[in-house]
Image (cartoon, rainbow, N blue to C red):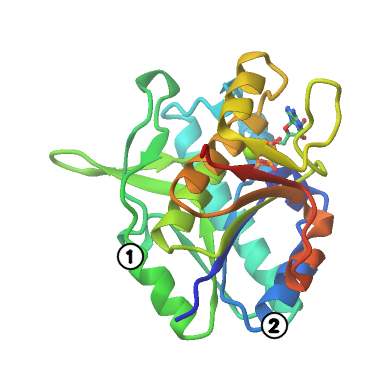
Amino acid sequence: MSAPFVIKVGGSTIDRGEAGIEGIAALAKSGERVVVVHGGGPEATRWLEAMGIPTRFERGRRVTDERVLPVVAAVFAGLVNKRLVAALAEARVSAVGVSGVDGGLLPCRIADPELGFVGEPETPNPAVLEALLAAGFVPVVAPIGFVRAADRTELVNVNADTVAAALGAALRATEVNFLTDVEAVRGRRGEPLTALTASEARALIAEGVIAGGMIPKVEACLAAAARGVPARILHARDAARLAAGTPPGTLVLPER
Ligand SMILES: Nc1ncnc2c1ncn2[C@@H]1O[C@H](COP(=O)(O)OP(=O)(O)OP(=O)(O)O)[C@@H](O)[C@H]1O
Ligand SMILES: [Mg+2]
């Protein structure tokens, strides 16, 4: 079985109907195997707001208490996941939505107790994805994992960038591509960076040049790159160039 592309679709772009669906569809139709991972932050924030639950982020990660967790699980694994599956179907791609709970895909441990029910992936069990790929489906993965405690299994929210990196490594992906709402990672003078090494990335994070949601994204790229999977951050509207083999954006490189 050929190595798949893992493509992370940002919540911010899904929201504006710019999720890069056409580009993902073109890649899948070109005969490549594709696994989609999605966020859905803005949609979750709106539902939380409607329910009077405040939203708080720490270093780009959503603080997930016992009131937030059921809402993000419902929004990510329900609404956002099904909308993406429907959008892919519209582009004539047979997609199947799963979460990290399905097939035991994404076992996690608690990332940091201060973040609440936020999971850090352990070794994924990609059998469910391999089965779907072998059957010709595009799996669409919602970023909800699980933590096994002594007497029960709890759902956890996992940053979608982190999920994409973990699955990219587990599937020995050809590439992990992070589709987002900016053309590239920007450097100290606001210039788009075509390549970014691990040490430069860490320096830019420490200086606050890389901030907010770009922190977990760049960290996820570093995790993938360190495991030998090329990782790229690009604008969703440039997804069409993936099938052509000429994607723009920022390529994150491991340290030599
Ligand atoms: N140095 C930087 N270069 C580019 N963007 C940056 C930088 N630092 C911070 N950002 C911000 O990171 C944002 C992208 O991350 P964000 O988490 O918002 O999007 P996403 O991951 O695509 O969506 P979601 O988290 O909902 O799945 C950009 O819109 C930008 O505001
Ligand atoms: Mg993000």
In this view, the residue farthest toward the top is 207
User: Taking 240 as reference, is 45 left or right?
Assistant: left
- Amino acid under disc 2: Lys
User: Taking 247 as reference, is 133 left or right?
Assistant: left
Quarter of the rendering containing residue 129 = bottom left
97 vs 155: above or below: below
Assess disc 1: are there few (<14), some (14-19) or many (≥20) residues with their C-alpha within 10 Å of its C-alpha: few
In the structure shown, which secondary structural element does the residue marked by tag 1 occupy? Answer: helix
Q: Image quadrant of ligand 1?
A: top right
Taking the spot 61% from the left edge, 15% from the top edge, the residue there is 206
Assess disc 2: are there few (<14), some (14-19) or many (≥20) residues with their C-alpha within 10 Å of its C-alpha: some
Taking the spot 56% from the left edge, 33% from the top edge, the residue there is 198
In this view, the residue farthest toward the front is 256
Quick check: marks 2 and 1 in contact, CB under 8 Å? no
The residue identified by callout 1 is 103
Q: Position of residue 104 (x, y in %)?
A: 31, 59
The residue identified by callout 2 is 29
Taking the spot 61% from the left edge, 33% from the top edge, the residue there is 48
User: Taking 182 as reference, is 58 left or right?
Assistant: left
Q: Position of residue 236 (x, y in %)?
A: 78, 54
165 vs 83: above or below: above
Q: Which mark is residue 123?
A: none
User: Taking 55 as reference, is 233 left or right?
Assistant: right
Front-lying residue, 254 or 91: 254
